[in-house]
Image: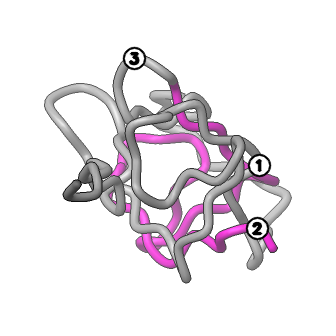
């Protein structure tokens, strides 16, 4: 199962319209939980999609990452300074021994 994108706050992004992501899918970067599809634009993506999802996640430190797939029930994209981040990212806590 691929985690659906529930909301997006990156209003400057080509794929964000009315608080929803309309990209075919997104990828989350490895060094920072950043949305790699974020594209700053005054234009909006014409081919509206209502079922965007996380295609691949490279944040191995995230508790929702299962072999590159996001296992969260949904993902919220947050705007951070000048880019978009995965707002659902949570650091994985090591099990107590």
Estimate the spatial distance between the alpha carbons at disc 2 and disc 3, rounded to whole Å. Answer: 21 Å
Given contact means CB atoms under 8 Å apart, are the residues at marks 3 and 1 in contact?
Answer: no
Q: Nearer the viewer, residue 56 or 36?
A: 56
**Circles 1, 2 touching at the beta carbon (< 8 Å):** yes
* SS for callout 1: strand
62 sits left or right of 60 in the view:
left
Query: As drawn, is 79 to the left or to the right of 86?
Result: left
Q: Residue furthest front?
A: 97
Quadrant of the rendered structure where residue 48 is?
A: bottom right
Location of mark 3 (residue): 31
Q: Position of residue 27 (x, y in %)?
A: 65, 38
Quick one: label 3, few (<14), some, or many (20+) residues within 10 Å?
A: few
| Residue pointed to by mark 2 | 2
The residue range painted magenta reads 1-29
Which numbered dot is residue 55? 1
Quarter assignment of residue 3: bottom right
Applied colour scheme: one colour
Task: Say above or below: 82 vs 66.
Answer: above
| Lower sequence index among marks 3 and 1 | 3
**Above or below 25: residue 83:** above
- The prevailing secondary structure element of the residues shown in magenta is loop
Seen at 35% across and 62% down, the residue is 88
């Amino acid at each position: 199962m691929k985690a659906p994108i529930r909301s997006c706050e990156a209003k400057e992004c080509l794929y964000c319209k009315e608080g929803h992501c309309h990209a075919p899918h997104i990828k989350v970067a490895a060094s920072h939980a950043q949305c790699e599809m974020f594209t700053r634009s005054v234009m909006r993506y014409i081919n509206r999609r209502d079922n965007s999802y996380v295609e691949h996640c490279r944040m191995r430190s995230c508790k929702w990452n299962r072999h590159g797939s996001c296992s969260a029930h949904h993902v919220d994209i947050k705007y951070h300074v000048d880019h978009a981040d995965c707002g659902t990212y949570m650091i994985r806590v090591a099990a107590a021994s």
